Amino acid sequence: MGVVNVTPDSFSDGGRYLTAGAAVEHGLDLVAAGAAVLDVGGESTRPGATPVGVTEEIRRVLPVVEALAARAGVPVSIDTTKSEVAAAALGAGASIVNDVSAGTLDARMLDVVVEHEAGFVAMHMLGTPRTMQHDPRYDDVVRDVGAHLRARVAAARAAGVPECGVMADPGIGFGKTLDHNVALLRALPELAATAGAPLVIGTSRKSFLGLLAGGSEPHERDDATLATTVWAFEHGVAMVRVHDVASSVRAARLLDVLDRATPAGTVAA
Ligand code: HH2
């Protein structure tokens, strides 16, 4: 899943693709690099980010979603917590809603997803982006996040999203300390089993990677991001949400070859 941020303030690429034209070109480049899904967002969710109103969020994302849905040749997802933004984007050709609140911030969200027969990514977040990094605490982070994902996946299915239309995401960095993020990454198979849905994860360029592996600036964290991609695919994750699509796609291709090779090293076509 390639990230297309149409925002002035996203933590790693804010302001780079703020015009619709630049965002669309970027999305097409990500598809050329191998992205299977494009995730378009018009509001930063970085810790402490200023909320964006519905009208402004729709103004940012709509032309980008419309153009990419027509031209990209891969499904387009809309990264939003607002049902009105989701409805506008789905009406313009998006087919997945990626909601970092898993439908908890807007009571209409799941109905909109069902009305448009869209897919749904349910992510775990503790609190809201404004407050989530203020001393987040859990009894047991793996158990608590797993239980929340299971409940939100069940809510999506109960609302009418088909079984194959839901994915779950532990929400790396969303109300999590460094230790919480590491614990979740170590428990990916368990989280997938508890959630009862395929997992997506988004580690791309996040600050915990800088703390663990070096890289004070977001763009210096692509190598560490790639390591988490390999870790994720080796631990049962179905999709990674990344800014640098090309490196993750190359790694996924190599893992696939190694998985399919015979003991003698022959790779079936
Ligand atoms: N992370 C971000 C945004 N959306 N969605 C899912 N499902 N999982 C994630 O981990 C996730 C997400 C934050 O990254 P980014 O979009 O690059 O930054 P910003 O929120 O500042 O725009």
Image: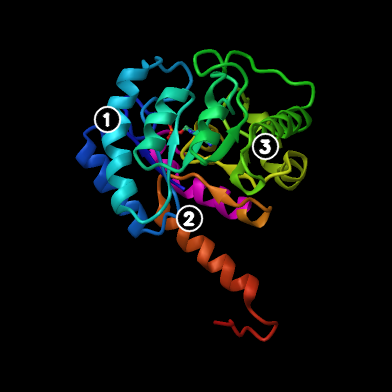
Q: Tell me the tag on residue 157.
A: 3
Q: How many marks?
A: 3
Question: What are the residue bounds of the magenta stretch?
Answer: 215-232
- Mark 3 or 2: in front is 3
Looking at the image, tell me whether mark 3 or mark 2 is earlier in sequence order: 3
SS majority, magenta? helix
Residue furthest front in the image = 115
> Which amino acid lies under the numbered mark 1 shown in the image of this protein?
Gly
Looking at the image, tell me whether mark 2 or mark 1 is earlier in sequence order: 1
Q: Judge: label 1 CB < 8 Å from ligand 1.
A: no
> Which amino acid lies under the numbered mark 2 shown in the image of this protein?
Ser
In three-dimensional space, the C-alpha distance between marks 2 and 1, rounded to whole angstroms, equals: 24 Å
Q: Callout 2: helix, strand or loop? A: helix
| x and y, in percent, of residue 29 in the image | 30, 53
Front one among 57 and 258? 57
Front one among 64 and 192? 64
| x and y, in percent, of residue 225 in the image | 50, 46
- Residue at the image point whose x is 53% and y is 61% from the top: 252
| x and y, in percent, of residue 171 in the image | 59, 32
Answer whether labels 3 and 1 touch (C-beta < 8 Å). Answer: no
User: Pointer 2: residues within 10 angstroms few (<14), some, or many (20+)?
Assistant: many
Q: 9 above or below 12?
A: above
Residue at which label 2 appears: 248
> Which amino acid lies under the numbered mark 3 shown in the image of this protein?
Arg
Answer whether labels 3 and 2 touch (C-beta < 8 Å). Answer: no
Q: 198 above or below 101?
A: below
Q: 135 above or below 33?
A: above
Q: Tell me the tag on residue 119.
A: none
Residue at which label 1 appears: 15
